[in-house]
Image (tube, grey):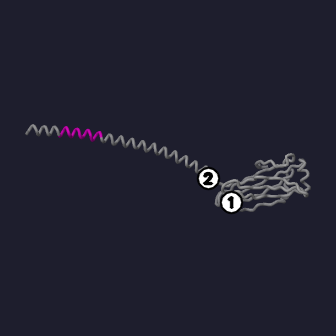
Amino acid sequence: MGQTGDNRSNQETADTANLAKEVHWIQHATFWSQVGLGLIGIVALCIYHGRLTVMKGQIAIMEASSRPYVGISTIKADPTQNGAAIIATINNFGTRPAFDFSAHWTILINGSSIAETGTRQEPFTLFPGRPVGLSASIGNQHWPGIAQGQDTLVIRATIRYRLRDDGPTDSYCEKNEYNALAKMFSPGKCTSE
């Protein structure tokens, strides 16, 4: 019986040592699996951050393209018995309405402004696909020289509108010079003169 007790004591010590080794191995396995899961989490976080950055860029592009873009689509001079009628068509080429839209122009003959004989658009909402016009007349005292290319005709049109009902104002100025040989206007940007 004494030897059995010693064997049992030695067996329990060996079992305890084996159990301690197994527990130690399980602790290591648990630790490294948590490290692995942490690394996978970091990789997933980086991937999702990249996707979020791309989505923010796409939203910025959508917002930039979803706005009003207002400008002159055509401008022409139609000769009449009393001179010429100048007609400009303004369009909203964007996808959203242009709030508080207004347009006016200055007609310059040989660099001097003539009295405004045309229309002026007061503020209103300009919807996409609904053009508006500006018109003016140039009398016989000026038109023959312009038509023959002896005098210069320049139209400076200024367009203002808000991007949103409560948003910032956008302003656009276009300078159109009449080309007597081509019998048409050549558009360009306004410069401070």
Looking at this view, is 104 or 15 the one in front?
Answer: 15
- The residue lying furthest to the front in this view is 129
Check disc 2 and report its element: helix, strand or loop.
helix
x and y, in percent, of residue 127 in the image: 69, 59
Q: Quadrant of residue 70?
A: bottom right
Q: Main secondary structure of the magenta part?
A: helix
x and y, in percent, of residue 183 in the image: 85, 48
Residue sitting at x 90%, y 48%: 148
x and y, in percent, of residue 48 in the image: 49, 46
- 24 horizontally vs 140: left or right: left
Q: Quadrant of residue 120?
A: bottom right
x and y, in percent, of residue 54 in the image: 55, 46
Q: Quadrant of residue 102?
A: bottom right
Residue 61 on the magenta span:
no
Crowding at dot 1, Cα within 10 Å, few <14 / some 14-19 / many 20+, comes out as: many
- 170 horizontally vs 41: left or right: right
Q: Looking at numbered disc 2 in the image, what kind of residue is underneath it?
A: Glu
Q: What number is the disc on residue 187? A: none
Quadrant placement of the N terminus? top left
- 164 horizontally vs 190: left or right: left
From the image, tell me which residue sits under label 2.
Answer: 63
134 shown above or below 44: below
Q: What number is the disc on residue 99? A: 1
Looking at this view, is 152 or 55 the one in front?
Answer: 55
* Distance (Cα) linking label 2 and label 1: 17 Å
Check disc 1 and report its element: helix, strand or loop.
strand
Which comes sooner in the sequence, label 2 or label 1?
2
Task: Tell me the magenta residue range.
Answer: 12-25
